[in-house]
Image (spheres, coloured by chain):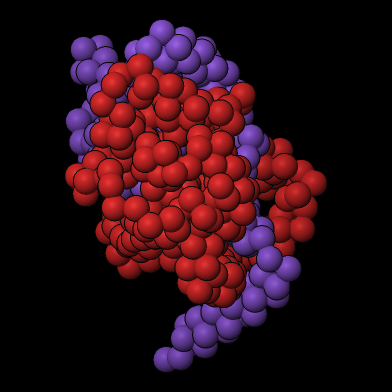
Amino acid sequence: MSVVAAISAPTVERRLRAWTLCRVFVRSLFLQASWNPRGMQDLGFADALGPALAELYPDPAERARAAARHLEFFNCHPYAAAAIVGGAARLEEQVAAGKATGEDVSTFKRALGPPFAALGDGFFWLALRPATALAAAMAVPFLGLRALLVFLALYNAVHLTARVWLFWTGYTQGEGIIASVSHAQVPRGTWLLKAAGAVLAGALAARSVLAASLPGRPWHGLLTAVAVVGFALALPRLGLLLAVYLALLVGIALGASIL
Amino acid sequence: VLGPVFTDAASLVAAALSAGAVAGLLAVERKGALQLMLSRPLVLAPLLGLVLGDAHGGLLLGVPLELLTLGGVSLGASLPDNETTLAACMTAMVVPAGLRLGSGVDEALAALGLLLLAPMGAVGRALERFAEERNVALVDRALARLQAGDPTGPRLNLRGMLLPFAITGALTAACVLASPLLAALVRACPARLSAGLEMGWHLVWALSAAAAVRAIRDHRAPALSALAAAAVAGALAIARALP
């Protein structure tokens, strides 16, 4: 039976309770607790599905066999994986009802893991996190310590909403999650966040230059401007650690009037 | 308002233990649990600063460290330098040293702290890899339990958080205990070297801004950043020139 057919097969028996789904979701927040280079998120995935398997398989031996199926290689973005955990819970209902096989669940996980990993990395790690962190960094002179709350609120409002939505949509729609995510305009949102991040990074650089340009030491501002441009160009070749030491040593040499 | 100065050994050990516990918990949050970004330098450094008695000092360290490490992303099996270890160690050593000096965190102290502790990001990455390799044994144990018919095997998942907690906690506590040495080093610095360290911190800020620009991985980002920088610089220069 195909995965799509398995998910869309009409069945009313052995649906998971809402409380069980909540427990699966909460456990999915610990998906990477034992991340390892061999199976990556394998143990976390098996653990997340534990409450669902406990409800579907009252017999401990049968449940252990079902859990063992999930100790297979799995890797995805930890937030986007919520959709796959939800979809797998739905498929496990089908497996328990004899309408799908364990292999269908594995196929579902293998098929959706890589594209959702790419989607999550691009949106959350490379767009949302830089943009919100930069917004908070820009707000520090005005808000002080409250800027942290700006960062956490902006980031987690999107992150937690997305995680809950992905889990629920994955559970209710299975492979239909792909269509739902494609309607969510994620690439457009990613680009907008990256553009906002780039603008904020530029504004931050300008502020650094102007902050260094105090009366009586105008050349500090010029030096900072040259340093920002120089480091931006050389950073990929230097690497961060070398660049940090270069900045510190040049600063010490200039500030101590050694040069 | 600066917190207590850890002059006696007992208060220093107590501060080391509490800072270690907080940093350990935040390190677990970085990858193993939740990922609410509490472990980012921008959040961790002020929180740890609060525990040690100077949240504002932590913020002064956290912002540039955040920008420096903004581009480090864990994609697949690749690991970036561990920004949580770096921020925890920096805060744990610099904040108590500032309290001991009575000045709080200033530019020279922060620069000297970074000079000593910058490799901790790479050290943290190596230790993270070590902890992850140890997790393979957890998976084997879980599988053995399942094969024996015990369905609770996957609960071993949570044990994977112990090692990151212990490693980061221990490193952080050690840095708090070493903070009097940093304070003594700063006291021993001649005025010229202090001025140099201050300048060094300004250039670290410049590097942070450059790293933030590089963190936006899009070919249009440098142009957008340049335009924004020009607009902000122009606007602020005009504002300054106005009577």
**Which quadrant would residue A188 be assigned to in this image?**
bottom right
Q: Residue at x 44, y 44 (%)?
A: A99
Q: Position of residue B119 (x, y in %)?
A: 60, 29
Q: Is residue A145 above or below residue B190?
A: below
Q: Residue furthest bottom?
A: B243
Chain B as rendered: colour: purple
Name the quarter where the C terminus of chain B is drawn: bottom left
Is residue A165 something that shows in the picture?
yes
Spot occupied by residue B160 in the image (x, y as percentages of width and height): 42, 22
Residue A105: x, y in percent? 51, 41
Q: Is residue A176 left or right of residue A59?
A: right
Which quarter of the figure is the N terminus of chain B placed in?
top left
Residue B77 placed where, x, y %?
64, 34
The chain coloured red in the image: A
Q: Is residue B57 above or below residue B10?
A: below
Please say whether residue B40 is visible from this viewpoint. no
* B114 in relation to A211, above or below: above
Residue nearest the viewer, comparing A185 with B64: A185
Identify the residue shown where x is 47% and y is 68%.
Answer: A180
The count of marks equals 0
The answer to whether residue A210 is above or below residue A65 is: below
Left or right: B107 in relation to B130? left
What residue sits 65% from the left and 36% below the top? B78
In the image, B158 versus A115, the foreground residue is: A115
Instruction: Give the quadrant of residue B106.
Output: top left
**In terms of depth relative to the viewer, which is nearer, B148 or A254?**
B148
